[in-house]
Image (tube, rainbow, N blue to C red):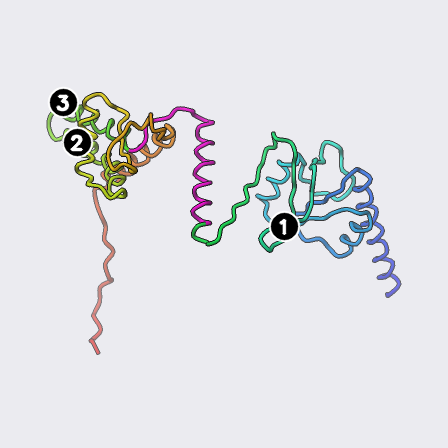
Amino acid sequence: SADELKNYNKSEESLLDEQIRGIKESGVDVLISGGSISHMALHFIDKYDMLAVKVSSKFELRRLCRTVGAVPLVRLGPVMPDEMGHCDLVETREIAGGRCVVFQQNDEESAVATVLIRSATTSQLDDVERALSDGVNAVKTLCEDPRLLPGGGACEIGLANIISKIGESRPGLEQYGINRFATALEIVPRILAENAGKDPTEILSNLHAAHKKGDSNMGVDIESGGIADMKEASILDPYVAKHQALRLATDVAITILRVDQLIMSKQAGGPKLPKQ
């Protein structure tokens, strides 16, 4: 009946009021929800002077919890002190014509930081974002393994010379495969020279001559168009990235060489239809 429906709505309102009041009495000022928030819940949240923020992405929700030190909960009710997070400032700001919610931690040792990138064009913005991502990943890699190698193709030329010496000492057809592997490593300084608009053959010959003299840090200098000491120029590559690239490239080459038969898919047989 209508009275029962009315009483049900009142009981639902009182239950939701009690739950949100319990959250407020626990000391919570900001509620973060991963799903939609009903109008009735928003009414009681506003009644108890709290802020509600909807975060649809689970990744963003987990990152926000890690930032403020909160524990995600699936229940609605009073919150324990060890489940609540802390944030120095939560406010809405207008950035580049759009409004966004900012969670600001004044502590310098915060677990998460946000970098705001702005640019006049989309292509320039993509380039800045890519450069920033590469820099962050380089720092992350160096935190795991701080070892560095000379860049500019110096490491590849050094490996090519070592592998070529090993190939010369091998008898039979095996030396051809080893020498081709050494030649494949020269593609890195060759591409660097081509991108700089220089003659790659001349650059490679100069690099080989310098490495044979013992200058193992010599690499391609795209600014001068010649070769230079990469260590003195502070052009270095992470050891982990170089090791993984060589390992994956070697695995791909070995996998391709292991293919001993190709099965080509052909059209099924049967009478051919006359051409119109």
Rendered residue at 85%/53% (across/down): 11
The crowding category of the residue bearing disc 1, from other C-alpha atoms within 10 Å (few below 14, some 14 to 19, many at least 20), is few
Q: Residue furthest front?
A: 224
In the displayed structure image, the side of residue 102 where residue 220 appears, left or right: left
Q: Main secondary structure of the magenta part?
A: helix
Rendered residue at 17%/24% (across/down): 165
The CA distance from mark 3 to mark 1 is 66 Å
Q: Nearer the viewer, residue 226 or 40?
A: 226
Magenta residue span: 125-152
Rendered residue at 30%/35% (across/down): 251
- Residue at the spot of label 2: 179
Q: Amino acid at mark 1?
A: Cys
Element under disc 1: strand
Q: Residue furthest bottom?
A: 276
Q: Which mark is residue 169?
A: 3
- Of the numbered discs 3 and 1, the one sitting upstream in the chain is 1
Q: Quadrant of the N terminus?
A: bottom right
- Of the numbered discs 2 and 3, the one sitting upstream in the chain is 3
Element under disc 2: helix
The CA distance from mark 2 to mark 3 is 11 Å
Q: Amino acid at mark 2?
A: Asn
Q: Which tag is nearer the camera, tag 2 or tag 1?
A: 1
